[in-house]
Image (cartoon, rainbow, N blue to C red):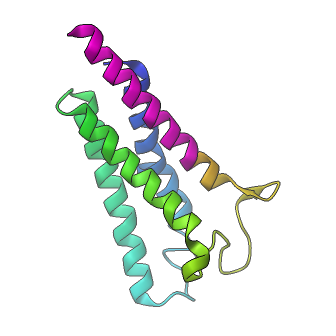
Amino acid sequence: MPKITILSVALCVFILLVLIPFMEISDTHLTNPEWPGHARLHEAWQLLENAAFSLLAFILVWKGIAPRIGIVIGLILSSSFLVAWLTGPLYGGSMAHSDGTEFAIGGISVVVVVVAIIAGLLLLGWRAHSQHIEVSA
């Protein structure tokens, strides 16, 4: 298994299982008193779901059970965030917290950049895995 394939999915797991929950289990998201309880329930669900699916993706790649499915799961998780961000103006979505702050550098959302990088690395992992199969065959 190419290292980039394993590393790209491992990075996806780290972001979705550790980093994002660390950032969102706070008063800006999950415990935000301004959010209705229903919105907080959906936030908890999304965090758990993303963590579980990213972990499944890693197991599928690491164990060699179904690497392509693992990569696709990672791509679904990362690209769905990017689509939600791109379509935010249609439904009033924003990267700004309820207090108006945003985790950005030079006006560019750090989270969007990191997720875009993950998606790109996953695509590289897909390509490397595909080439690895062709060479092995």
Q: Is residue 119 magenta?
A: yes
Determine whether 108 is above or below 4 in the image: below
Is 134 in front, or is 31?
134
Q: Residue at x 56, y 46 (%)?
A: 116
The quadrant the N terminus occupies is top left
The quadrant the C terminus occupies is top left
* Left or right, residue 38 beside residue 104: left
Percent position (x, y) of residue 33? Answer: 55, 87
Residue 28 at least partly seen: no
Residue 102 at least partly seen: yes
Q: Is residue 90 magenta?
A: no
Picture quarter containing residue 48? bottom left
Percent position (x, y) of residue 6? Answer: 37, 27
Q: Residue at x 64, y 68 (%)?
A: 95
> The magenta stretch spans which residues?
115-137
Picture quarter containing residue 122? top left
